[in-house]
Image (cartoon, rainbow, N blue to C red):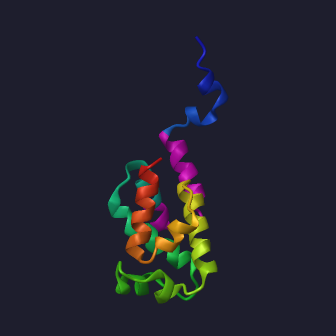
Amino acid sequence: MTDYNAVNNPAARLTETDQEAIWRHRARHYSPEFQDAFVRYMQTSDRACLRTLADGLLVHHIDDVSAEWIAQQGENLNLKTGIASDSITLAEVAFAIEELFEVSMNNQDLAEMETLHDLANFIERKRSAK
């Protein structure tokens, strides 16, 4: 009997290596450290990856912010007053999260995301709901 789901859905035939290549391609604009954490998180939901992912999103999308500076600030870094005082910058980060993690965000989600810790928890919560 033919498995029409596998025939009509190329994703059904992806190997683990293929899936990793897709994730790496999706994160290709980010640092190698981010890419490694992204692949590991997508494969295992390893919570230890979340801080690297949150830091990497901010470093990539916010001008004049370094990974070292973010690390010094800690997980309570305020996203709205500490680094990204304009809503356009936060919206860019939100769009990146949606694209990378294949989740959706609404205005309420964005309003509730105040700290780096909130950002990491948001990613985990949305991904676990999938």
**Magenta-span inclusion, residue 130:** no
In this rendered view, identify the residue nearer to me: 117 or 45.
117
The magenta-colored residue range is 16-37
The residue depicted at 51 percent of the width and 78 percent of the height is 59
Numbered marks: total: 0
The residue depicted at 45 percent of the width and 53 percent of the height is 127
Placement of 12 over or under 110, stated as above or below: above
- Magenta stretch, main secondary structure, is helix
Residue 7 visible in rendering: yes
Give how far across and how far down residue 90 sits, in percent. 57, 76
Give how far across and how far down residue 61 sits, in percent. 58, 77
Location of the N terminus by quadrant is: top right
The residue depicted at 42 percent of the width and 49 percent of the height is 43
Residue 30 visible in rendering: no
Give how far across and how far down residue 94 sits, in percent. 57, 68
Q: Quadrant of residue 41?
A: bottom left
The residue depicted at 57 percent of the width and 68 percent of the height is 107
Q: Quadrant of residue 78?
A: bottom left
Q: Outermost residue toward the front?
A: 108
